[in-house]
Every structure is written in structure tokens, then in C-alpha cells.
Image (cartoon, rainbow, N blue to C red):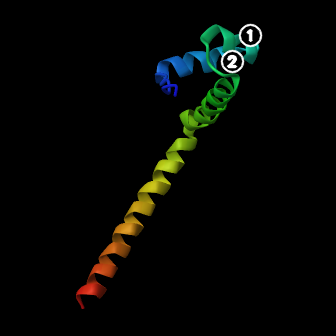
Amino acid sequence: MAKRRRFSPEFKAKVALEALSGEMTLAELSSKYDVHSNMIAAWKRQAIDGMADTFGKGKTKAKNSETEIKELHVKTGQLTVENDF
């Protein structure tokens, strides 16, 4: 059974940027880096999705998660009081 290969984030970013540039096809990149073309397509999609977070979308996500955490703390406190009572 083959052992899974792990790729560093730097390598993934490098390959995704080359895929985004469009100079080579996914098949060419696949043979160049010895990575399946589906993986390159997934990394490319993740890079595109990650760019939106870079330009401000991620800030609203962080605020939403902070408010969610506060709400969960309040709920935990209420449940603790109810259990103690």
C-alpha cells in the first residue's frame, strides 16, 4: 500500500499560482510536479476562495465567530445554572 504524500503550503501555493496564471494546462502542471490534476484544480479553487478573505470578507467571518463564541458562553452559563439548581 502506498504511503500518502504530504505537500507543504508553500508548494501548494506555488502550483496554484502557476495554475491561475494559465500559461500551462492542468495536465502539463500535473506531469511537471507529479501531482494529480484534480489536486491542482482543488488547490486552485482554494486559492481563489482564500483571496476573498484577504480583501475583507474574512473580517466579517471573524466577527461572526466572536459573537457566536460569546453566545455559546452565555448558553453554557445558563445550562450550568440550571443544572446546579
What residue does disc 2 label?
A: 19
Residue at 30% across, 87% down = 82
Viewer-proximal residue among 69 and 37: 37
Look at label 2 and name its amino acid: Ala
What residue does disc 1 label?
A: 24
Which quadrant of the figure has residue 41? top right
Q: Is 1 left, or right, of 80 in this rendering?
A: right
Q: How far apart are the alpha carbons under marks 1 and 2? A: 7 Å
Residue 1 location, x and y as percent? 52, 28
Residue 38 location, x and y as percent? 69, 28
Residue 76 location, x and y as percent? 33, 73
**Crowding at label 2, few (<14), some or many (≥20) Cα neighbours within 10 Å?**
many
Residue 10 location, x and y as percent? 48, 19
**Crowding at label 1, few (<14), some or many (≥20) Cα neighbours within 10 Å?**
few
Residue at 49% across, 23% down = 5
Q: Is 13 left, or right, of 74 in this rendering?
A: right
Which quadrant of the figure has residue 18? top right
Label for residue 81?
A: none
Residue at 68% across, 18% down = 19
Q: Residue furthest left?
A: 84
Number of dots carrying numbers: 2
Q: Is 39 left, or right, of 64 in this rendering?
A: right
Say above or below: 78 vs 53. Answer: below
The kind of secondary structure element at disc 1 is loop
Say above or below: 54 vs 74. Answer: above
Do the CB atoms of the residues marked 1 and 2 lie less than 8 Å apart?
yes
Q: Is 38 left, or right, of 70 in this rendering?
A: right
Look at label 1 and name its amino acid: Met
Viewer-proximal residue among 21 and 54: 21
Residue at 47% across, 53% down = 63
The kind of secondary structure element at disc 2 is helix
Quadrant in which the C terminus appears? bottom left
